[in-house]
Image: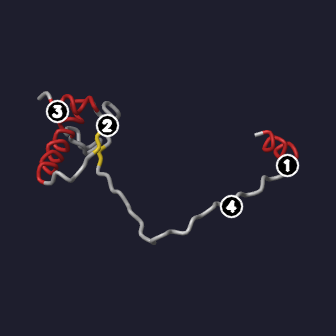
């Protein structure tokens, strides 16, 4: 930090650092695709509108449909995974 402040005062630009790279041992890249859904309760629609899928003119999202469909698909293939962050929707769906 001190070095950066001194460079800024002098008008000099800091030296660019080169990224260190490691050779890939087997040239195979593993990519993990994680299905997920992200919805903010009350962001552009009310909680109920998001849950039911009402007011599609604002945003097309129906949480009940998303969760119903995801659970159906997870039942068909137990190796599948799904991430979900909005516990308020999950709790409402679970307790219905």
Dot 3 or dot 4: first in sequence order is: 4
Q: Residue 85 carries which label?
A: 2
Query: Helix or strand or loop: what does disc 1 sit on?
Result: loop
Residue beneath disc 4: 18
Residue located beneath label 3 in the image:
93
Whether residues under marks 3 and 1 lie with C-beta atoms below 8 angstroms apart, the answer is no
Q: Residue at x 14, y 27 (%)?
A: 95
State which quadrant residue 49 falls in.
Answer: top left
- Name the image quarter holding residue 59: top left
- For marks 4 and 1 on the same chain, the one whose residue lies earlier in the sequence: 1
Q: Which residue lies furthest to the front in this view?
A: 25
In screen coordinates, is 4 left or right of 91?
Answer: right
- The crowd level at tag 1 (other Cα within 10 Å; few <14, some 14-19, many 20+) is few
Q: Which of marks 2 and 1 is in front?
A: 2
Within-10-Å neighbours for mark 2: few <14, some 14–19, many 20+? few
Q: Residue at the right extreme?
A: 10
Give residue 58's position: percent from left, percent from top.
29, 41
């Amino acid at each position: 930090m001190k070095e950066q402040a001194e460079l800024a005062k002098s008008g000099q630009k800091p030296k660019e650092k080169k990224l260190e790279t490691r050779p890939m041992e087997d040239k195979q890249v593993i990519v993990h695709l994680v299905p997920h859904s992200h919805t903010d309760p009350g962001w552009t629609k009310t909680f109920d509108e998001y849950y039911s899928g009402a007011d599609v003119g604002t945003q097309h999202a129906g949480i009940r449909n998303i969760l119903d469909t995801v659970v159906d698909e997870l039942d068909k293939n137990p190796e599948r995974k799904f991430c979900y962050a909005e516990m308020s929707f999950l709790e409402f769906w679970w307790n219905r």
